[in-house]
């Protein structure tokens, strides 16, 4: 008789300072959750953890149940009512009986009245089925809680940023759980948490301590000392008691080694904690640097990274500070993506392709958590193209997934071509430009509202990368936030 495996994806990275709300429709990037066969069809062949779970379950000949797939762009906390709607299909599937549960979660989800949504999810599933084997994959930016560890059998997470190894993380967690089901191993876990708010702009393995820690984790896995070792640098824009850096390690019935490896990983992070702080350069100086670089011929585009207003971390994606400075300093041959402004898209659609328009672009969102009011930028240009915004990701992140920018318009000012969308979307794939007729490889400058994920597709094209500290709720300067729930003292807000 075949085993019954339940597979589910519920993901939200919650920026508790974000002005962006999170209705149920946002899970599915504007389309709402998917269920059953539709969910399987949407995820099969992608590079997400749940796609690895599907492959493993099919290899094992298991009956596959996918009660829900729900992922939202980062934004503020969702309501308790929405959380209950997300959990009910999962709870019902577990209650109906299963042999194993494979969860693709984020790890930094906050809901109304609950700082630890993943912990609550796991606690409730465990209450329904106390002995159920549970595999969990977590995002690199997890704020790990004791409740998550206590209620999972196996936890793994991504080791790359940009996250190009999501499938591999799912395969590792899934295979370990299958081995446990067969009695080949007895997984135990240990973790270590640090009071360390690390800037996301310093999380990439090539940028700071994370590279050394991940190399050590991979070495321990290769040597067989541990079954899995995961660094979780945390998500500093979620103001919770669990916000911080952590490491979680799985071994085969060896809790002492698991704890020793987790302690070693955390020890490296603490010893080098100053490197997790991003030195901030004034915006005008950064744009001037890009302008100077552009005076000489370059083998590829110069990237300007608007990292303070990234929807991939909860930004509104309509702060115009960097765009305004780029235009003020007179950069030419610039491609910009994306600015989220449904009203501007509607105005350009009404004007039509080939017509000149003057629009109050962006700046439609106030951000009271950081005392920032929206400031639109008056821009005159020609509408060059209009699309439905439906794109297919070519990789290497989220490879093969179909996603939606909403209706999209291209505004050409002469100096810059600006991609304006109805929906949030981080520019981690060339399709954001290519679907509307721009070849980013041929531009002198590319301005992206991103932080690190742009590196997956755009870094190979770039001659230089210039990080631009504009404004917004994904600011790398953590002193701009009014933290009320993090553990104190905590570095770098306090001297430790």
Image (cartoon, rainbow, N blue to C red):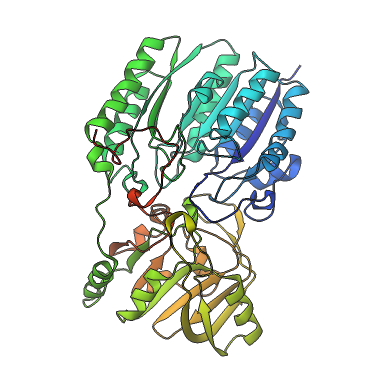
The image shows residue 392, relative to residue 13, as above or below, that is: below
**Is residue 56 visible in this depiction of the protein?**
no
Residue 344 at x, y percent in the picture: 58, 76
Asked where in the image residue 31 lies, by quadrant, the reply is: bottom right
Q: Residue placed at 55% from the left, 28% from the top?
A: 136
Image quadrant where one finds the C terminus: top left
Q: Which residue is drawn at 50% across and 38% down?
A: 108
Answer above or below: position of 463 versus 377.
Answer: above
The furthest residue to the right: 96
What residue appears at the point 34 percent right and 74 percent down from the top-left corner? 325
Foreground of the two, 389 or 41: 389
Q: In x, y percent, where is residue 141?
A: 44, 40
Counting every numbered tag in the picture gives: 0
Image quarter (top left, top right, bottom left or bottom right) of the N terminus: top right
When asked about the image quadrant of residue 77, the answer is: top right
The answer to whether any part of residue 295 appears in the image is yes
Specify whether 148 is left or right of 271. right
Please name whichever residue, 334 or 37, is drawn nearer the observer in this view of the structure: 334
Residue 361 lies, with reference to residue 41, above or below; the image says below
């Amino acid at each position: 008789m075949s085993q019954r495996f339940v597979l589910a994806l519920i993901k939200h990275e919650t920026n508790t300072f974000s002005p962006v709300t999170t209705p149920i429709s946002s899970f599915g990037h504007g389309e709402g959750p998917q269920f059953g066969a539709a969910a399987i069809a949407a995820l099969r062949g992608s590079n997400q953890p749940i796609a690895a779970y599907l492959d493993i379950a099919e290899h094992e000949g298991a009956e596959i149940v996918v009660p829900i797939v729900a992922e939202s762009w980062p934004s503020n906390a969702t309501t308790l009512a929405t959380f209950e709607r997300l959990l009910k299909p999962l709870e019902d599937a577990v209650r109906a009986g299963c042999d194993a549960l494979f969860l693709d979660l984020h790890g930094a989800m906050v809901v109304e009245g609950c700082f630890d949504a993943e912990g609550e999810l796991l606690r409730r599933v465990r209450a329904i089925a106390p002995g159920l084997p549970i595999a969990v994959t977590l995002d690199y930016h997890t704020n790990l809680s004791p409740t998550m560890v206590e209620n999972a059998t196996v936890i793994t997470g991504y080791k790359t940023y940009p996250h190009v190894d999501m499938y591999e993380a799912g395969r590792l967690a899934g295979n370990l759980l299958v081995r446990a089901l067969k009695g080949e191993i007895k997984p135990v876990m240990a973790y270590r948490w640090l009071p360390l708010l690390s800037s996301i702009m310093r999380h990439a393995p090539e940028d700071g301590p994370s590279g050394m820690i991940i190399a050590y984790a991979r070495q321990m896995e290769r040597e067989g000392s541990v079954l899995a070792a995961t660094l979780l640098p945390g998500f500093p824009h979620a103001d919770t008691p669990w916000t911080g850096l952590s490491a979680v390690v799985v071994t085969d019935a060896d809790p002492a080694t698991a704890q020793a490896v987790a302690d070693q990983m955390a020890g490296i992070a603490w010893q080098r904690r100053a490197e997790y702080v991003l030195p901030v350069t004034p915006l005008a100086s950064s744009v001037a640097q890009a302008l100077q670089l552009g005076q000489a011929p370059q083998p590829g585009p110069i990237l300007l990274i608007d990292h303070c207003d990234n929807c991939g971390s909860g930004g509104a994606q309509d702060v115009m500070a960097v765009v305004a400075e780029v235009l003020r300093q007179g950069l030419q041959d610039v491609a910009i993506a994306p600015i989220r402004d449904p009203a501007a898209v509607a105005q350009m659609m009404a004007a039509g392709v080939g017509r000149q328009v003057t629009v109050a672009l962006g700046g439609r969102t106030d951000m009271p958590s950081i005392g920032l009011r929206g400031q639109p930028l008056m821009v005159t240009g020609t509408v060059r193209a209009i699309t439905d915004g439906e794109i297919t990701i070519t990789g290497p992140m989220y490879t093969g997934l179909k996603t939606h920018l909403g209706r999209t318009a291209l505004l050409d000012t002469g100096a810059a071509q600006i991609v304006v969308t109805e929906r949030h979307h981080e520019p981690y794939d060339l399709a954001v430009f290519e679907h509307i007729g721009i070849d980013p490889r041929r531009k002198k400058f590319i301005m992206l509202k991103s932080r690190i994920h742009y590196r997956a597709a755009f870094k190979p094209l770039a001659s230089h990368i210039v990080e631009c500290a504009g404004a917004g709720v994904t600011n790398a300067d953590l002193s701009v936030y009014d933290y009320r729930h993090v553990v104190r003292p905590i570095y770098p807000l306090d001297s430790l």
